[in-house]
Image: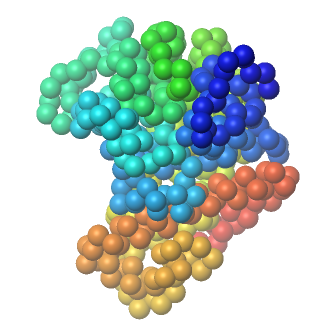
Amino acid sequence: MVVDAGESTGAGRPPVTGTPMAAEGFAFSVEARDGAARAGRLTTPHGVVETPCFMPVGTKATVKAVQPRELRGLGAQIVLGNTYHLFFRPGTEIISAHGGLHGFMGWDGPILTDSGGFQVFSLETTRLLRDDGVEFSSVYDGSRHVFTPEVAMRVQEDLGGDVVMAFDQCAPGTLPGPELEAAVERTTRWAAACKEAHSRRDQLLVGIVQGGVDETLRRRSAAEITGVGFDAYAIGGLSVGERGEEMLATVALMDELLPSDRLRYFMGIGDPIGIVDVIARGVDVFDCVLPTRMARTGTALLRGGGRLNLRNARFAADLTPLEADCDCYTCRTFTRAYLRHLVTQKEILGAQLLSLHNLRVLLRLTRDARSAIRAGRFAEFVGHVAGRGSAGG
Ligand SMILES: [Zn+2]
């Protein structure tokens, strides 16, 4: 690695190995490949992220019902914060007063913030799409606001996450062709504006490729976004209603089109089978609210993709753990009957314990995927996970 004279990675920061990035203190390297699947290492100023990696979502600066120290114990390496929600509640001033999100939420590991774009485009409010951004009403009080690339960059700089996202138009593949094409054009223009506006050198800015499941538009978006040039790339606009095989074909296409030495982030996938499917097509990191959201409705996620609804009466006298071979605190300590009791009595502990288990399932799955890739037996691993799924849960 070449280090410029006088450059320092800073006291206490992890050593930077791999391909250095424009962002200071960051690097990414692919350490092993098995087919298209990759095992990599992302170095950030707040620690190393070994990939493939599932990123728990902490929408409002909390991974719901889970303490930061518990996240550490579960093997979480990086968590997400949500720009839209944090911008409105509590606002960036309060978070800045804590030195940024790390201090505010008590998590000293890497943090990724989204751009707010997904909420602006998906939450049911009246919105006006403009060339320079989006005018919309806050879901909190109905007040009117405009998010532009410049605003999205400023807010994310104030929040102080390690990895920040370009402001894009998240367009589902189900949109008519001309609208999807307009979204691709807008996303490219906004990506360039984000790169121009982003000034914090200690943050990694990620460019987002759109285009739904339209191959021509995906190719065009990938060419334009890599043309703007980013340290890492995200695959946006999938997992929003298109068919499974179209989604996977698009991810496989992205493996061809994105630079092989850059981190790839698939936005929004959280079921075990879906996760191994995208890892098999060259994705490094992904996120989803699924494990914690399901936990709050009394549902346990199983490693093979099955689910257990703890409200079901058949668990009332079930003295077995959720999953016999799970190493989480919940499975090592409690029976299905006890968990069902907590869920049906609406006890807070039920959501907490199910959240621990559901997160552990995905974090362990991705850690095991990494080991399998490094050992050159990823195909066997995929078969094992899929086999558990078809065995039922
Ligand atoms: Zn468990």
Residue at 64% x, 59% y is 365
Where is residue 88? Give x, y as percent.
Answer: 24, 33
For the C terminus, the image quarter is bottom right
Residue 81 falls left or right of residue 259? left
Colour pattern: rainbow
Measured from the top left, where is residue 235 in percent x and y?
57, 31
Q: Position of residue 174 (x, y in %)?
A: 46, 30
Q: In the orientation shown, which residue stands out farthest toward the right?
A: 376
Look at the picture and state if 243 lies above or below 214.
below
Total numbered badges shown on the rendered structure: 0
Place residue 59 in its image quadrant.
Answer: top left
Q: Look at 36% across and 9% down and name the residue there.
A: 132
Q: Is residue 358 above or below residue 88?
A: below
39 up-or-down from 367: above or below: above
Q: Is residue 381 left or right of residue 312?
A: right
From the viewer's perspective, tell me whether residue 140 is left or right of residue 53.
Answer: left
Residue drawn at 27 percent across, 17 percent down: 146
Which image quarter holds the N terminus?
A: top right
Q: Position of residue 44 (x, y in %)?
A: 60, 36
Residue 89 location, quadrant: top left
* Residue 314 seen from this side: no
Q: Is residue 350 above or below residue 256?
A: below
User: Within the image, what quadrant is residue 302 found in?
Assistant: bottom right
Q: Nearer the viewer, residue 333 or 117?
A: 333
Tell me if I can see residue 147 in this picture: yes
At 60% across and 40% down in the image, what residue appears? 12
Please name whichever residue, 129 or 190, is drawn nearer the observer in this view of the structure. 190
